Image (tube, grey):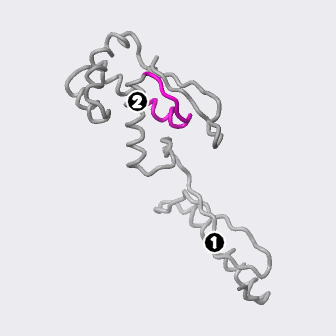
Amino acid sequence: LVVPRSISTVLTMRVLLLLALLVAEASAFVTGGTSFVGTSIASTCPAPGYVSSRANISMMRHRKKMPKLGKPADQRKALLRALTTEVIRHGRIKTTLVRAKAVRKHVDHIIELGKRGDLHARRQALGWVYDKQLVHALFEAAPDRYGDRNGGYTRVLRTVARQGDNAKMAIIELV
């Protein structure tokens, strides 16, 4: 149900919206205060007779490089732990490109722990990888296999897109 409004009401609301935007922009230039300048408020002027109370608010994502993978934090951590375990177990897995790039960091870190080989590194690896015997096998083989390499233990190869949803797929493998 749309209630028709008079032209003066619409003009009054536009003037108030313009004043609110001017006040918001002026407060962004306050010096010495604790004003937060990370938001921008953008509003469009709709057709006459239509009044909207919504504004488009966007914030900058500085220093937030980690991909969220479309999951809450606990599910994302479980997914990365499972992918890390499977890459170390099988040597190569097929997954989406974004997941492969996200898990690469964790696989490299676990292999670095295996190269170090001390008790603290072993306990850190046991806290992340799901399979205890896999961690023991990694700690036996990693110094020999990756002793002369200083990082870059994984390779991400792009493959064809997935059939159902056209997602970019990749193969992550141990070098």
Res 23 → quadrant: bottom right
In the rendered structure, does residue 93 fall within the stretch colored magenta?
yes
Residue at point 33% right, 10% down?
144
N-terminal label among 1 and 2: 1
Residue 43 screen position, x and y as percent: 69, 67
Relative to 43, is 147 on the left or the right?
left
Relative to 48, is 104 on the left or the right?
left
Span highlighted in magenta in the image: 91-106
Q: Nearer the viewer, residue 95 or 123?
A: 95
User: Which residue is tagged 2?
Assistant: 86
Residue at point 64% right, 76% down?
53
Q: Which mark is residue 54?
A: 1
Query: As displayed, is residue 118 above or below residue 64?
Result: above
Query: As displayed, is residue 131 above or below residue 155?
Result: below
Res 139 → quadrant: top left
Q: Main secondary structure of the magenta part?
A: helix
Furthest toward the left, the residue is 119
Residue 56 screen position, x and y as percent: 63, 64
Relative to 7, is 1 on the left or the right?
left
Q: Nearer the viewer, residue 70 or 39?
A: 70
Mark 2: which amino acid? Answer: Glu
Mark 1: which amino acid? Answer: Arg
In the rendered structure, does residue 20 fall within the stretch colored magenta?
no
